[in-house]
C-alpha cells in the first residue's frame, strides 16, 4: 500500500487527490458564485443538473450542465453547486430554452482562474487540455470545420467559450 494512501472499504483513498478535487470544485464554486442548478433528468448512471445564464445579445442561450453520479433527488429540485460532487461540468450554448430562472455572475480573473491550461490532443472535433499537477481535464469543442483554439490558455477563457467540458480524471 502507498505511503500516502489508505484502503477505505474496497477503494483506495488518496488524500492528495481528494484535496486536488476539492480545490477544483472550489474554483468553479467561486467562479460561478455558487450558482443554483435544477435537476433536469437522470441518464443511465448519471443525474444532470442545469443552470441558465443571462445573455444579452445572442439568440443562443448559455447553460451550465453538471453531471453527478445518479442520485435519488426528484426532477426539478434545486441544488447549490457546492452541494454537487460532479464528474463533469460543462459550459455550453444552445438554442433550446429550458423553463428555469436565468441567473447571472461576473466572470472572474486572477488566481486561480488564470491557471494555465496546455494542449494535450487535438482532433477535428475538439481540443483537449490539462493543467499542471491536477486531475482537471478540459475539452474545448470546435465549431464545425473550425479549429480556433491555441496550444495554451487559462481556465477562465475556457469557461467563457461556452463550448467546454470539464472532467476530473481520478
Image: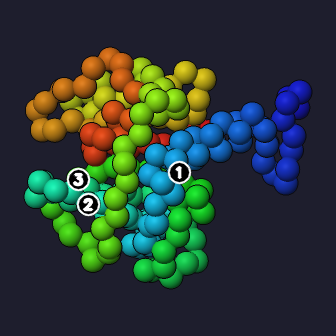
Q: Earlier in the sequence, mark 3 or mark 2?
A: 2
The residue that label 2 is drawn on is 54
The residue that label 1 is drawn on is 29
Do we see residue 65 in this rendering?
Answer: yes
Asked if disc 3 and disc 2 are in contact, CB closer than 8 Å, the reply is no
Viewer-closest of 27 and 164? 27
Q: Quadrant of the C terminus?
A: top right
Q: Earlier in the sequence, mark 3 or mark 1?
A: 1
Q: Which residue is painted at 31% across and 29% down in the image? A: 127
Give the number of the mark in front: 3 or 2. Answer: 2
Within 10 Å of disc 1 (Cα), the crowding (few <14, some 14-19, many 20+) is: some
Is residue 122 shown above or below 84? Answer: above
Is residue 37 shown above or below 135? Answer: below
Viewer-closest of 123 and 136? 136
Identify the residue at the far top of this view: 151
Viewer-closest of 5 and 53? 53
The residue that label 3 is drawn on is 93
Within 10 Å of disc 2 (Cα), the crowding (few <14, some 14-19, many 20+) is: some
Q: Which residue is painted at 12% across and 38% down in the image? A: 144
Within 10 Å of disc 3 (Cα), the crowding (few <14, some 14-19, many 20+) is: some
Q: Which residue is painted at 75% across and 33% down in the image? A: 16
On screen, residue 83 versus residue 124, left or right, reads right
Query: Tag 1, which secondary structure?
Result: helix
Q: Earlier in the sequence, mark 2 or mark 1?
A: 1
Q: Which residue is painted at 44% across and 72% down in the image? A: 39
Total number of numbered labels? 3
Q: Position of residue 82 (x, y in %)?
A: 58, 58
Q: CA distance from mark 2 to mark 1?
A: 18 Å
Amino acid at each position: 500500500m502507498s505511503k500516502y494512501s489508505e484502503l477505505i472499504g474496497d477503494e483506495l483513498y488518496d488524500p492528495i487527490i481528494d484535496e486536488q478535487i476539492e480545490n477544483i470544485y472550489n474554483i468553479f464554486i467561486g467562479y460561478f458564485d455558487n450558482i443554483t442548478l435544477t435537476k433536469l433528468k437522470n441518464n443511465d448512471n448519471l443525474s444532470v443538473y442545469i443552470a441558465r445564464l443571462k445573455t444579452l445579445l445572442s439568440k443562443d442561450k448559455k447553460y451550465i450542465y453538471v453531471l453527478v453520479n445518479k442520485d435519488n433527488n426528484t426532477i426539478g429540485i434545486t441544488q447549490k453547486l457546492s452541494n454537487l460532487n460532479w464528474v463533469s461540468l460543462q459550459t455550453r450554448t444552445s438554442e433550446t430554452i429550458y423553463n428555469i430562472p436565468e441567473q447571472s455572475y461576473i466572470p472572474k480573473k486572477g488566481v486561480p482562474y488564470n491557471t494555465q491550461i496546455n494542449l494535450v490532443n487535438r482532433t477535428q472535433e475538439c481540443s483537449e487540455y490539462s493543467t499542471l499537477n491536477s486531475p482537471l481535464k478540459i475539452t474545448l469543442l470546435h465549431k464545425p470545420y473550425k479549429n480556433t483554439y491555441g496550444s495554451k490558455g487559462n481556465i477562465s477563457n475556457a469557461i467563457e467559450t461556452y463550448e467546454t467540458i470539464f472532467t476530473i480524471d481520478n
